[in-house]
Image (cartoon, rainbow, N blue to C red):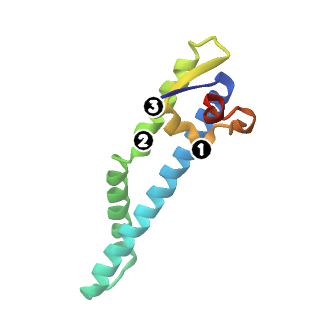
Amino acid sequence: MQIRISTGDCRTAIAAALAATEAKLVEDRARLHNDCLANIKQGAEHNGVVMTPALLKEMQDIAQRDADHMMQRHMGNENILILKNFNAMLDYHDGIDIVIDDQDFNLLKDHLPKQNIGDRPDPALAAG
């Protein structure tokens, strides 16, 4: 399925989707780092390891590397590339509106303005 939206609404939705996705990446990276660090500390404490500042720093470095590694495959990274490409494509578009497909809609739906469908006739009533 495809829908038509204004080019301006599309650009606004892309910018909002980019900002939201980038914020989600930062949030998820922090959460993964904290979870990794907590698990490493818990394992060390379980094994009777005495915490020193140097050991804690090493644990933090390990947790950061693990979080960075896990974030490489985060879907948000690919979505950012898609959204940036979509925005670049709009630079070549000179119309007032654009047709988007279901995949584009899926990336943008939370950031598109709601359409007032209450004024549209009900297709079921029109057919009857």
Give the residue number, with chain letter if any, for mark 3: 82
Q: Residue at x 53, y 26 (%)?
A: 100
Q: Which amino acid type is shown beneath numbered disc 3?
A: Ile
Give the residue number, with chain letter if any, for mark 2: 77
Depth check, front residue: 70 or 9? 9
The numbered disc on residue 124 is none
On the image, the x and y values in percent for residue 75 come to: 39, 45
Depth check, front residue: 76 or 9? 9
**Image: 109 above or below 98:** below
**Distance CA(mark 2)–CA(mark 1):** 18 Å
Q: Which amino acid type is shown beneath numbered disc 2?
A: Asn
Question: Mark 1 or mark 2, which is nearer the start of the sequence?
Answer: 2
Depth check, front residue: 106 or 83? 106
**Image: 94 above or below 128:** above
Q: How many marks do you count on the picture?
A: 3
Q: Residue at x 45, y 33 (%)?
A: 103
**Image: 76 above or below 35:** above
Image quadrant where residue 40 sits: bottom left
Give the residue number, with chain letter if any, for mark 1: 110
Mark 3 or mark 2, which is nearer to you? 3
Farthest residue to the right: give it: 119
On the image, the x and y values in percent for residue 29 come to: 44, 56
In contact (CB < 8 Å): disc 1 and disc 3: no
Quadrant the C terminus occupies: top right
Report crowding for label 1: few under 14, some 14 to 19, many 20 or more residues within 10 A (C-alpha). few
In contact (CB < 8 Å): disc 2 and disc 1: no
Image quadrant where residue 87 sits: top right
**Distance CA(mark 3)–CA(mark 2):** 9 Å
On the image, the x and y values in percent for residue 74 come to: 38, 48
Q: Residue at x 64, y 22 (%)?
A: 7
